[in-house]
């Protein structure tokens, strides 16, 4: 079974500053990795995904993530955040069983 | 294309009652999964349906059940509701073709059990 650890539960950041959200996973086999964002009172929206190929993946809204197999990490980054990026972010992993395992989430609060 | 839709969006029930939630996947998507989100346990997988068959199941009691219809729409049922069943229930659909691992989520149904 795979598990996901999001190392920061809360990340406060000033507008236009960079942000990094850390995600580590544990699995003995190859996995597929995802980042989702959840705005208040909404469902989950896919930000980006890693299935195979290039380890640097770009997503929507200026986000990108880097898959590091040796460190079993999939950290999410954005070089300059906006107020509208205030949300909860979830890292998730799945294998061929199509069952997503989620991290506990990281709440990002962007301040002016 | 319309996204995943879930009805109702909000629901209030009392302990002991049963509830049915509905999910319509993105057109052409054949796989539907259900997840429960609570502050204490986070996001947890309930089950997945594909071609009207339950293909995978999470670690939930038998009070939680589901089904899928021939048009891929899915329903989830919870019987004998408990206070701890209060949660946001999310439905996700997936094309279910080769290399189609991405799940697309609906807005969720927020269930409050009193």
Image: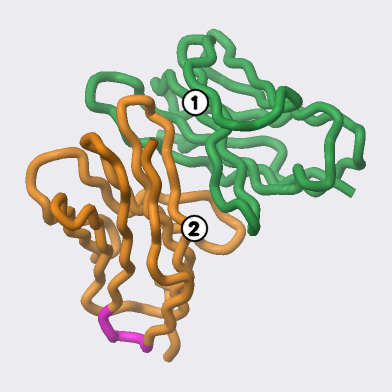
What's the magenta bit mostly, secondary-structure-wise? Answer: loop
Instruction: For marks 1 and 2, give the one nearer the viewer.
Output: 2
C-beta proximity under 8 Å, tags 1 and 2: no
| Residue A41 location, quadrant | bottom right
Check if residue A78 falls in the magenta segment: no
Which residue is painted at 26% across and 62% down in the image? A75
Q: Are marks 1 and 2 on the same chain?
A: no
> Which chain does the green colour mark?
B
Q: Say which of B32 and A93 sits in front.
A: A93
Residue A36 vertical position relative to residue B46 in the rendered view, above or below: below
Residue A5 rendering spot, x and y as whole percentages: 39, 57
> Which chain does the orange colour mark?
A
| Residue B103 location, quadrant | top left
* CA–CA distance in space, label 1 to label 2: 22 Å
Q: Secondary structure at mark 1?
A: strand
Q: Secondary structure at mark 2?
A: loop
Q: Which mark is residue A19?
A: none
Q: Which residue is mark 2?
A: A104
Q: Residues within 10 Å of mark 2 (few under 14, many from 20)?
A: many
Q: Is residue B108 left or right of residue B92?
A: right
Residue A6 vertical position relative to residue A81 in the rendered view, above or below: above
Residue A72 vertical position relative to residue B25 in the rendered view, above or below: below
Chain letter of disc 2 in the image: A
Which residue is painted at 21% across and 36% down in the image? A30
Q: Which mark is residue B32?
A: 1
What segment carries the magenta color?
Answer: A14-18
Residue situated furthest bottom in the rendering: A112
Residue A97 rendering spot, x and y as whole percentages: 37, 25
């Amino acid at each position: 079974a795979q598990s996901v650890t999001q190392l920061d539960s809360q990340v406060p950041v000033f507008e236009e500053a960079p942000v990094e959200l850390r995600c580590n996973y544990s699995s003995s086999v190859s996995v597929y990795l995802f980042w989702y964002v959840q705005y208040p009172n909404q469902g989950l929206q896919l930000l980006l995904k890693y299935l195979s190929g290039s380890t640097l993946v770009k997503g929507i809204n200026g986000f990108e993530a880097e898959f590091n197999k040796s460190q079993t990490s999939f950290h999410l980054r954005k070089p300059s955040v906006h107020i509208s990026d205030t949300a909860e972010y979830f890292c998730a992993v799945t294998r061929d069983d199509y069952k997503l395992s989620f991290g506990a989430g990281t709440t990002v609060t962007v301040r002016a | 294309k319309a996204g995943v839709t879930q009805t109702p969006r909000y629901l209030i029930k009392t302990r002991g009652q049963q509830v049915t939630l509905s999910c319509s996947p993105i057109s052409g998507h054949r796989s539907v999964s259900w997840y429960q989100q609570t502050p204490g346990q986070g996001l947890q997988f309930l089950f997945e349906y594909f071609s009207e068959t339950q293909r995978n199941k999470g670690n939930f009691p038998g009070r939680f059940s589901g089904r899928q219809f021939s048009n891929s729409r899915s329903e989830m049922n919870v019987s004998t509701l408990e206070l701890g069943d209060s949660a946001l229930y999310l439905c996700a659909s997936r094309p279910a073709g080769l290399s189609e691992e991405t799940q697309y989520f609906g807005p969720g149904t927020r269930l409050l059990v009193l």
